[in-house]
Image: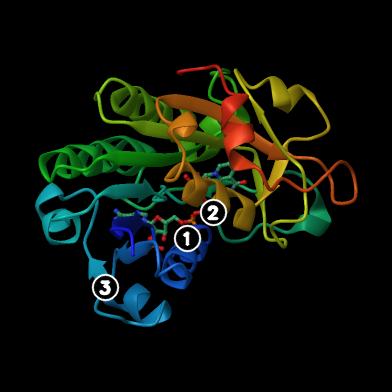
Amino acid sequence: MADLSTVLVTGASGRTGQIVYKKLKERSNQFVARGLVRTPESKEKIGGADDVFVGDIRDAGSLVPAMLGIDALIILTSAVPRMKPGFDPTKGGRPEFYFDDGAYPEQVDWIGQKNQIDVAKEAGVKQIVLVGSMGGTNLNNSINSLGNGNMLVWKRKAEQYLADSGIPHTIIRAGGLQDKDGGIRELLVGKDDELRQTETRTIARPDVAEVCMQALKFEEAKFKAFDLASKPEGVGTPTKDFKALFSQITTRF
Ligand SMILES: NC(=O)c1ccc[n+]([C@@H]2O[C@H](COP(=O)([O-])OP(=O)(O)OC[C@H]3O[C@@H](n4cnc5c(N)ncnc54)[C@H](OP(=O)(O)O)[C@@H]3O)[C@@H](O)[C@H]2O)c1
């Protein structure tokens, strides 16, 4: 049997991170799975196995045990905007959002991701996959005004830090995430938010998770950054050839 690759997914109790953690466990002939979550409650939520570590990405020291000996890291942590109570959709208007103290995008999406990259590098990681978001080329994107967090700005700063790190990496800038089945749509890669100008700018979370997994397998995915979306179900051919998908990407950032 080929050597197994030890892969840590962070944000392992998050909506996409959970799927990656599950896929890693299912492919035990290729991977030794590890997950990182923020709290013991989150650890329980995903089964409480010994391969789930508890740590806070804002505290670099707390990440060391999870990172020791890993071959690859998949970053699926993110600041989470919370809706202010009292919003009544029947009255129209837009909900307002806020971030918990200390959990603004600057602390989570920038410092938190940077800590992960630094600790993983120190631990000798060979590849890092980072999931970010489409929309970052436009400072006026409405996501930046959520809770005054400038979320896409801080995410992009972390992406740049990874790109400059010298570590083989894959930066996936996902379109609008949907909780739908994966593996049944044609995936689209793009650059510079061009897909946002089209009708095809969403992607199912399981498809994002699968692209993270496949990025670990192909050289064609390394030192690349790209936007990711999919055609609607029933249009085009469901993507199976990920080497070909990654080969289409020409952008390094
Ligand atoms: N929503 C969209 O439409 C959309 C579109 C494009 C891209 N994206 C991006 O895609 C990625 C995945 O999104 P998702 O919706 O699957 O994620 P999610 O469910 O919001 O999960 C984020 C995870 O990060 C963890 N986390 C937050 N702060 C942490 C900390 N200080 N230490 C350790 N863990 C921490 C959270 O843990 P706790 O729950 O314990 O806090 C949670 O498990 C994110 O980067 C997101 O911004 C989202």
Q: Residue at x 17, y 38 (%)?
A: 121
Instruction: Give residue 133's mark.
Output: none
Q: Return the residue nearer the eye: 96 or 191.
A: 191
Q: Are marks 1 and 3 in contact (CB under 8 Å)?
A: no
Residue 243, x across and y down, in percent? 57, 37
- Please name the amino acid that badge 1 sits on: Val
Q: Residue at x 45, y 18 (%)?
A: 252
- Please name the amino acid that badge 2 sits on: Ala
Q: Residue at x 80, y 48 (%)?
A: 92
Q: Residue at x 47, y 60 (%)?
A: 20
Instruction: Give residue 209's mark.
Output: 2
Q: Return the residue nearer the eye: 140 or 116.
A: 116
Which residue position holds label 1?
A: 20
Is residue 239 left or right of 151 when viewed as pictured? right
Is residue 136 left or right of 79 when viewed as pictured? right
Closer to the chain start, of discs 2 and 1, is: 1
